[in-house]
Amino acid sequence: MKTSYLLPHKYKIVGWILFVIGLIVGCFLFFGEYETDALTINVLSIFNEGDIFGGKKGYFKIVENSIVDELVTLAIIFGGLLVGFTKEKVEDEFIYKLRNDSLVWAIIFNYMVLVFTILFVYDFTFFHVLVFNMFTPLMFFVIRFNFLRLKSTSYEE
Amino acid sequence: MKNRIKVERAEIDITQANLAAKIGVSRQSINAIEKGKYVPSAVLALKIARLFKKPVEDIFTLEDQD
């Protein structure tokens, strides 16, 4: 079946490696309260409104920043995209349908969880919700898709 | 939509995996179609019928709620 925007199957393993490493390092960062000075380099900040994190207001400035969290975020996002949007070993219309169904399920589920946290999580704790919400749509999708795929693999009669 | 794939498969004695490989789909697809969890596209239905050398209506039939 022709599927225009799926990458070849060989990239899936790259995706899983990035995704898992990203999640593991991400958990360490999260439980370490995001504080690290590792890999501090000069980066381009196109806009900073001057905020609680101590940045100064301004446009297009070179600032110092530890890029560990940026790298972890990108690893999870690219990893998740590769895992979710590469072809399966045998890609056909049924797998394609599973993928689409999982996407719809993941988006709805994600926003239901978000609505719940909007109603019942307040103050700075909600910041954690926002951080997690960068990744949860992809994570729910990957989990749901693989769950459905493995479920339909089971038992031949 | 009902189908007789399982029966047809038994008649010529091939497994789900064999059938899937011959048509070029995943075994999950054949499994899901047999269980009635997935309605194949017209193309896939025609391919399955061709493999069993029967008209597509002999293998796939509409049900009342379709």
Image (cartoon, rainbow, N blue to C red):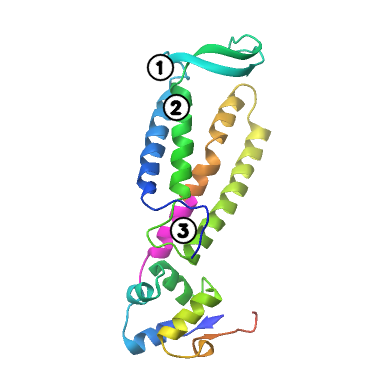
Residue B33 on the magenta segment: no
Region rendered in magenta: A144-157
Q: Which residue is mark 1?
A: A39
Instruction: Tell me which numbered mark, 3 or 2, is placed earlier along the sequence.
Output: 2
User: Which secondary structure type mostly characterizes the magenta part of the structure?
Assistant: helix
- Of badges 1 and 3, the one in the foreground is 1
Q: Is residue A19 left or right of residue B3?
A: left
The amino acid at mark 1 is: Leu
Q: Chain of mark 2?
A: A
Mark 1: few, some, or many residues within 10 Å (few <14, many ≥20)? few
Give percent across and percent down for residue A146.
43, 53
Residue at image coords 60%, 41%: A113
Q: Is residue A145 visible?
A: yes
Q: Which residue is mark 2?
A: A71
The dot on residue A148 is 3
Residue A82 lies in what quarter of the image? top left
